[in-house]
Image (cartoon, coloured by chain):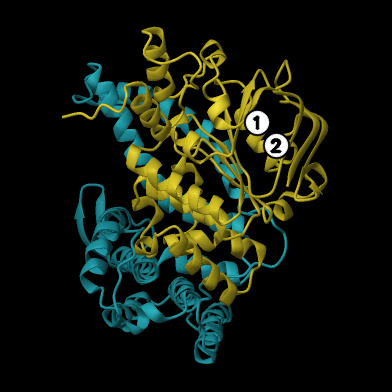
Amino acid sequence: MTVGFYQHRESSVHRLNPLTKLTLAVAVVIAAFAVPLTWWPAALFLVVLVPAVLAARVPARFAALTVKFVGPLLVAVFLVQGLFFPGEGAELARLGPISVKAEGLAFAAQTATRLLVLIGAFLFLLLTTHPGVLMNAMVQRGLPPNISYVVSATLQIVPAFRERAQHILRAQQARGMATGGGLRRRIGVLLPLIGPLALGALTEVEERAVAMEARAFGATGRRTSLMPVPDTTAQRLARWGLAAFAAATIVANALGVFA
Amino acid sequence: MIELDDFSYAYPTGSRPALRSLRLAVPAGQLCGVVGPSGAGKSTFAHALAGFIPHALGGETAGRVVVGGRTVADTPLPDLVRDVGLVLQNPFNQISGVKFTVREELAFGLENLGVPQEEMVRRVDAVLAELRIEGLADRSPYQLSGGQQQLVALGSVLVMRPSVLVLDEPTSQLDPVGSGQVFDAVRALHRAGVTIVLVEHKLERLAEIADRVLVLRHGEVALDGPPATVLADPRLADWGVAGTRYTAAARLARERGLWPEDRDLPVTLDAAVAGFRAVTGGVESR
């Protein structure tokens, strides 16, 4: 079963502790937004994320998802910032009220590449890290089990509910309800679908809660893990290094190093 | 092992008690079946034994339930689940949703209890073998059939090694194959000495494995005794409990004068075969 975005591969990146990959993702995102140099986010993307994705052997999926998520944003950013940039600057072209300025294009390029780093960094994490392992690692680091429950259960139960919604839909089709057609009709179809789905889920909440308590979910003592997530000193050092790097970019920007 | 001492219970929203002055004891190692029409209090009874009444569901209780020497109302749930395992009807709702493989799903309760890892691995492997589901160990719990999911739900309670197992209609949502798997597992656990309370509608199956059957009606014990006596009782039909098909067949035979009045009605296939063989003079089919 595919869970979230995870792509199983035998790679050294996949074997890294999820916290290391999480720290890497957060650190490059902070760095990309902290440093106001136009070329900087693109450099981070090419020098850090692309090699990481290649090492993890997931380049095709990464590229496809990046285009899918960043593409529409890219178009929007260039349209808005590139064509309607409010600030001063050299005008490159003009068409009625629309003026293309160099500053506008530079700003659009920086915003777009920052978004590219943001989305790319988390895609890298999600493509190479099984959500179960990520949650295990975080619970072992003190994340409350309730939060882990919400994340993991959402990933697994939502697809199961989608299947149930299909059943309800088919049951209603079997009783002669038309489900195709225009937008108005489709919205009309949603209402009789949501009712049984939501009510079904609510009536099951109690049984679900009882089943969880029957397995001591409410226990307050120290928890253990069937599969402790391996960690190494090198990775711990790397995480501190990444955190220091991210902090340094913020401090440098605050001190006006890039001004 | 289980004692109910004048135990009564009313749900917070209920206008009348769901259980009334129950007095009974289930000795260690017994497999006690519970039957009754819907609304008779069977599920309530199961939840009371496992401590969810009063701990999780609230409501008003009187009298007490003692399991394994501990008074249920005075024992916190996380402690109680080590002694009493509860398996519910719907396999889908019992999958935690937090774990991505059956192996991890089985270990979930042990992780919550802080059982050391090596011990956890040992217990999970033992339960996988016991329920003969080793082949499912690395699959997602959501990819299994209902019967397999119910075995996983049973296994995830068994890893905690409860001395009492309470099953609330564990096969009501399963197909015949899935039901068979669950009954086989229950039979094996009974042989291994686990005290079992099994709420069940499939009376033919229950008759084969139970040592004793309780009939609940309006929250009270209407009948209590060996399955051969209780399940053949003619009053069951009046109370909305369909007896076994074997009893029904023999009763019909009796109405037609084929089954002697002094011969007990059968509740299992074996008893029915033996009975019909005796009354027909052992005629073999061609």
For the N terminus of chain A, give its image quadrant: bottom left
In the image as oriented, which residue stretches furthest toward the bottom? A234
Image colour for chain A is: cyan
In depth, the one of B158 and B209 nearer the eye is: B209
Q: Quadrant of residue B59?
A: top right
Residue B271: x %, y % from top left = 43, 31
Question: Are circles 2 and 1 on residues that touch, CB within 8 Å?
Answer: yes
At horizontal 48% and vertical 56% (from top left) the residue drawn is A152
Q: Which residue is mark 1?
A: B44
At horizontal 76% and vertical 40% (from top left) the residue drawn is B3
Please say if A36 is above or below A146: below
Give me the disc on residue B48. 2
Alpha-carbon neighbours of circle 2 within 10 Å: few (<14), some, or many (≥20)?
many
In depth, the one of B178 and A249 nearer the eye is: B178
In depth, the one of B114 and B168 nearer the eye is: B168
SS for tag 1? helix
Distance between the alpha carbons at the discs numbered 2 and 1: 6 Å
SS for tag 2? helix
Residue A223 placement, left or right of A189: right
